[in-house]
Structure formats: structure tokens, C-alpha cells
Image (tube, rainbow, N blue to C red):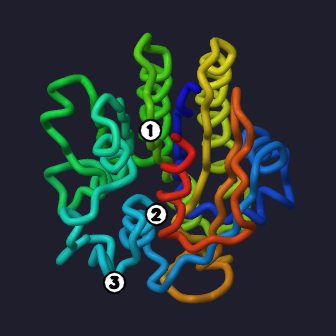
Amino acid sequence: MTRSHILLLGVDGFYLPILEAEPLCGPALMSLAQEGTRVDMRMPVPTLSGPGWATILTGVPAEQHGVTNNQLFGNRLVMFPDLLSRAFYADQTTVTFAAAGWSPLVDPASTGPVIHERREQQLAGLHYVISREGEQRGYTVTDAEITDYADFALRQDVAVDVGFVYFCGTDEAAHLFGTEGPEYRRAITRIDTHVARILARVEERAARGEPWLVAAVTDHGHRPEGGHGGGSDRETASFVLARGYGRPNPDWPARIEPHELAGLLLAERA
């Protein structure tokens, strides 16, 4: 049996109930929700991107990986391989890909990164990492660039086995404008356009006989006025939307802890 390819889409600061109330602003993401498996999560406090993504990607809680802030100071990430690294260590023919515009996730020059550099595998063509600087250039531009790289990776003859693609335009819009106005909805629509492009490539590969599992997840929600870090229902709200292409949807519990997602995704490779 052919092993499933896994693609995790990270959408930072995405408060899903807004999309569910106005599905026309994000039809590609809604397709994952309506045609896939929906799982609810609650992110632990502090609801910040650093600890949130570290927990989701490493599969261990903050008490273990040591990330408690967005600077990632004092982390123990070297001891806890990320989703992509774990897939490679389980099978050293695995090709992995990561693309993000927030440097602590992927840039070895940062105080992280959460995604291990694995330079030897990069040199061997088994691990590809794209890092862009969204904090300086803005995420409208950076998310579009990240999509270009993901699209390119998905068009290659050698398929990505396990990938992570990160978008931050929703978080940026929420911090600047809050979540109740048109700016946040436009950010959702921009990211949804990127997701639709990626899903089209996945569908092409699935039509050629490759089974794929695509999952979308967020690291935290936002208060209506914008902002996060606390323990309110809106700040801790998270989810997983997982859909199979050329394979069944995953049979997962209706609710999981954030540190459980990486293990569930890896189990779908079998």
C-alpha cells in the first residue's frame, strides 16, 4: 500500500468561527471543514505563536520543549524533533519541505528554529526549507511568496512526503484592525486563495495515484479588538481540518490536545 503524503497548513491567528459564519470569504478552507474531519483544540496559556507552534510541531507540551514566548529564549527544541524530522528519522528516504515567513519557525539564524535545520538532509536533497521575513516586509507579500514556493515544490517529479506551509496574514490583520471588520475577512480570503492553489496541486498529484492528507491548524485565536496571550475562549480557540485526497479522511477524536496532532499525522503515514 502506498504511504500517504502529509501536508500541514499553518494559519496563524485564525479564528475559525468567523469563517463558519461567513463561508464565502474562504471556500477552500471551508471545503476542508465540510468534506474532511473537524477536530477542536484548546491552546494552553500563554496563547502566543512561539509556544503554540512549538507544541503543535514537536508533539510535546511547553513544559518539555521550553518555549514560553515568541523569542523562544531558553528553549529545549534540540531535544524534541519537529514533525518533519520525526518523519525522516522513522524512514530516512522521506522528503520533507517547510516554508514560512516567520523566522523562528524555520531560520537557523533565529533563536529557534522549531523546524530543525538538518543540513545534511538539505545537502542530500531530502529536506527543503524556505524562510522569508514577513515581520519586516508584511505578510500580504510574504504569504504570496511562500505559496509560490509551495506550489513549485508540489510540481516536482519527486513528491514531498511530509510538508509544513505557514501563513500569517490573518494574525497580522487581527493585530492591526481586530477581527470584527472587513480587513480580517479580506486576510482570510487572501490566504484562502493561497490554500486553493495548493489544494489544486494536491488534487493533481492524488489523481495520479498519490494518497495525500492535508490538514489546516492555527496556534491561537484573537480577541475581537485584536490581541492574544490570555486564556479567554476566543484566544485559546484552535482546530484541525483534515481531508484526504486519494485516501479516506482520518478517523480522529472530535477533540484533542495540541501536542497530540503531530503523532496523529505521523500515524497516517503508515
Residue 45 picture location, percent across and down: 48, 85
Binning the other alpha carbons within 10 Å of mark 1 as few (below 14), some (14 to 19) or many (20 upward) gives many
Q: What residue do we see at 37% from left, 44% from top? A: 87
The residue nearer to you, when weighing 204 against 168, is 204
Q: Position of residue 187 (x, y in %)?
A: 63, 50
Of the numbered discs 1 and 2, the one sitting upstream in the chain is 2
Q: Amino acid at mark 2?
A: Ile
Locate residue 157, reporting x and y percent.
43, 10
- Front residue of 200 and 223: 200
Residue at numbered disc 1: 163
Image quarter (top left, top right, bottom left or bottom right) of the N terminus:
top right
Asked where in the image residue 196 lies, by quadrant, the reply is top right
Residue 253 to residue 74: above or below:
above
Q: CA distance from mark 1 to mark 2?
A: 14 Å
Q: Secondary structure at mark 1?
A: strand
- Residue denoted by label 3: 63
Alpha carbons under labels 3 and 1: distance apart:
26 Å
Report the Cα–Cα distance between label 2 and label 3: 13 Å
Residue 56's disc number: 2
